[in-house]
Amino acid sequence: MRIFRGIRAHISEPCVLTIGNFDGVHLGHKALLARVRAKAAELGQPATVLCFEPHPREYFAPDTAPPRLCSMWRKLALLQSAGVDQICVQPFNADFADLDADTFIRQVLVEGMQVRHLMIGDDFRFGRGRNGDFEALKEAGARYGFSVEAMGTEEVAGERVSSSAVREALQAGQIEHATRLLGEPFVVEGWVQHGDKIGRTIGFPTANIRMRQQTLPLSGIFAVTVDGGPLKHAVGAASIGYRPTIAEGLALRVEVFILDYSGDLYGERLSVRFWHKLRDEKKYDSLDALKAAIGKDCDDVRAWFATHPEYLSLREQHG
């Protein structure tokens, strides 16, 4: 898979294109990408994605933009797994945001991406003020020589699949529902870094995952599986939160205790898959009370996986 930064970065052949943020690469995205791949195979042209960095909502309203479902690097990996041939990551800046719909079509789609067939979601809008729509694209396609196709909504149990729906499920602690919308478990990835080692002093040494994101769409204590370094589908209990028992005002941290493992994970890059929420984060009166709670969490993790054998096969499928 080829990755380009910016629309003028060596896009040298006509392509079948889709455009979007693809946050989380959920089932709706995957259905759209499958159609793009099929059309690309039919026309003998590369299946291409145009996405933006940062997310437009992060550019226009950084203080209120929702947390991302995945990092840019994970997004690229998911798009590659979906069979995309090339990805153009367009910097979303003031100049790009100021393009009107007609200029976007001419400079970005025609001159920049050399689009021959454009596949979009049914809610796609573009250009300054989001004034461009499907009808504008069809008219431009007749003028510039590209075809346009809009894909309908993908649903799971009657609910429209969207990044917002996934985010809402995660925030509500409905991890299994988020998994159904994504088509796979929600994942946090990062390098294991040294922490304050308080977990070690109470018998539960944790892997502290260094996060680039300052916010995540979920919090609490979870049943997870972990891959990376020496670990393969390892079962664990993960905490996402601010550790109120330790101190007030601490930064968000992702900590994972790996059941039945005692090795060193510092410097390893881990992928943590979230399967079930056990409880919310809580402030305890003492470290002894925290230790007892973590012990119960570990028992609950074992019990949950024991009573949900279907997840054992799923964790291997997505590991």
Image: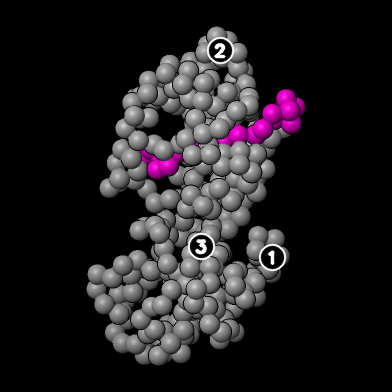
What amino acid type should be assigned to the residue bearing mark 1? Glu
- Residue 49 belongs to magenta span: yes
Residue 18 in the image: above or below residue 144:
below
What amino acid type should be assigned to the residue bearing mark 2? Tyr
Q: In the rendered picture of this protein, how many numbered marks are placed on residues? A: 3
- Residue 196 belongs to magenta span: no
Q: Nearer the viewer, mark 2 or mark 1?
A: 2
What secondary structure is found at the residue carrying circle 2? helix
Q: Which residues are magenta?
A: 39-57
Looking at the image, residue 154 sits to the left or right of residue 209; the answer is: right
What secondary structure is found at the residue carrying circle 1? helix
Determine the residue located farthest toward the left in the rendered image. Answer: 248
Depth check: give the residue in front, 239 or 319.
319
Q: Are marks 1 and 3 in contact (CB under 8 Å)?
A: no
Q: Are marks 2 and 1 in contact (CB under 8 Å)?
A: no
Residue 247 spot, x, y in % from top left = 26, 77
Is the image coloured rainbow, by chain, by secondary structure, or in one colour?
Answer: one colour
Taking the spot 55% from the left edge, 9% from the top edge, the residue there is 143
Where is mark 2, residue-wise? 144
Where is mark 1, residue-wise? 316
Where is mark 3, residue-wise? 189
Which quadrant holds the C terminus? bottom right
